[in-house]
Image (cartoon, helix red, strand yellow):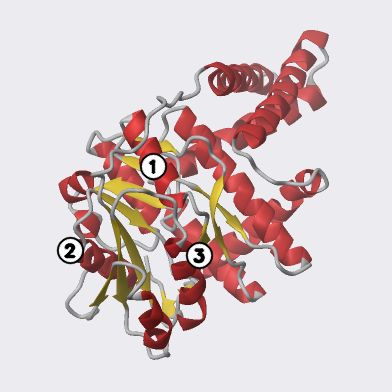
Amino acid sequence: MILLIPLTACLSIVGVIVMLFCVYTLLFCGRIKKPTSPPKESKVSVIIPFRNEAHNLGMLLTSLKNQNYEGPFDIVLVNDGSTDSWHEVVSPFQSLLNIILVDSCYDETKSNLSRKQHALDVGVSASVGRYLLFTDADMVLSVSWIFELVDSAVSMGVACVFGHTTIIQSQNSFRKRCEAYQLEILFTLAYVCSRLGIPGSCMGNNLLVSRTTYVACGGQKGLGYSIVEDYDFLQLLHKKGFKSAACEPFTSTAQTYPCTTLRQYYNQLLRWAMGGLRPSSKLFWMGMCALAVAFSGVFLAMSASSTMLWVLPAVFGISFVAVSIIALTNADAKIPWWFLPIYPVLLSIECLALLGALIVGVRPVWKQTRLVE
């Protein structure tokens, strides 16, 4: 017990320093974009893999038709073995948009990639744009989606930009609202990591990568098989020496639909946990360090008899709240106050459920495919 108090005090001091550094970075070290417009010759290719998404493609293509981007762009639709009436939905838009239709022709016996990865590489091969924008079929994009991503890439001089995706809240469901608010917190963490220069995470449904960077990284083949190809590609990109950034300003430019069932939501969380929280992942060790510091603060507050030692967890707690408020504000996160106190409880329940699934060996089913890692 005597040895634990100095150790937890040191961890609390480290936690305070990290929190204060985060406050300083978020307040005073923001990326200021130059007042410039993307060059008119910046050709863009939007890569959209899909499988049985006829019910969603109409809204997506309508939002792409309404883009305010003045440069040329094409849309590469990659059919990944659809059996629905997708062609009837796409056909009316072919006279309104520059659409390139390709088939993925995935054969798992001959490919070392997932279905999604294979479709992405097929789409890139069929594209001609200088910038590659990736999204999914179940998305609705703001009119400035292309412009904001390209403008951020050009003005900040980075090879990769990720945007802010939110969930469409069309139904008054507590579970769906929790899903939406949790995604906002995850995007806030990704934004903070980006501002700190750490390759945290992103979502492949709102992502820009320059063509030269994608090719230099070897595309999806450069990753090998992955169930979280967006996260793994971001890590590979940084290993290759390329820079990435969050879109500035980090307002929401894309929306997606919530999971339709609790099982689907659980499978999504399990996929993220399997892929993003591996022991080899930076996120895993960042999480472990955060837990260690948090528990150290709690232990120190409960066991310390000295007033000076009480100050450490108090300062850490205050600085953590300050970082949270600044980060949520800068990331334009739309989260009601009542969700923040219950989120740690929700997160604890999710972690226990996911841990049990990983120990038992449960594998998630996503997009009609059982995933393995």
Using the rendered view, name the quadrant where residue 308 is placed.
Answer: top right
- Residue type at mark 3 is Met
Q: Residues within 10 Å of mark 1 (few under 14, many from 20)?
A: many
Residue under the image location 37 percent in, 29 percent down: 36
Residue under the image location 65 percent in, 16 percent down: 6
Q: Residues within 10 Å of mark 2 (few under 14, many from 20)?
A: few
Q: Is residue 359 left or right of residue 302?
A: left
Mark sitting earlier along the chain (2/1): 2
Indicate the quadrant containing the N terminus: top left, top right, bottom left or bottom right.
Answer: top right
> Is residue 206 visible in this depiction of the protein?
yes
Mark sitting earlier along the chain (1/3): 3
In the rendered view, would you say 204 is above or below 298? Answer: below
Mark sitting earlier along the chain (2/3): 2
Q: Identify the residue under disc 1.
A: 161
In the rendered view, would you say 139 is above or below 130? Answer: below
Q: Which mark is residue 139?
A: 3
Kindly state the secondary structure of the residue where label 1 is placed.
strand
In the rendered view, would you say 5 is above or below 90? Answer: above
Q: Identify the residue under disc 2.
A: 125
Indicate the quadrant containing the C terminus: top left, top right, bottom left or bottom right.
Answer: bottom left
**12 or 241, which is in the foreground?**
241
In the rendered view, would you say 38 is above or below 64? Answer: above
Q: Which percent across, then down, holds residue 83? A: 38, 91
- Residue type at mark 1 is Val
Q: Is residue 353 left or right of residue 121?
A: right
Q: Which percent across, then down, holds residue 209? A: 30, 47
Kindly state the secondary structure of the residue where label 2 is placed.
helix
Using the rendered view, name the quadrant where residue 4 is placed.
Answer: top right
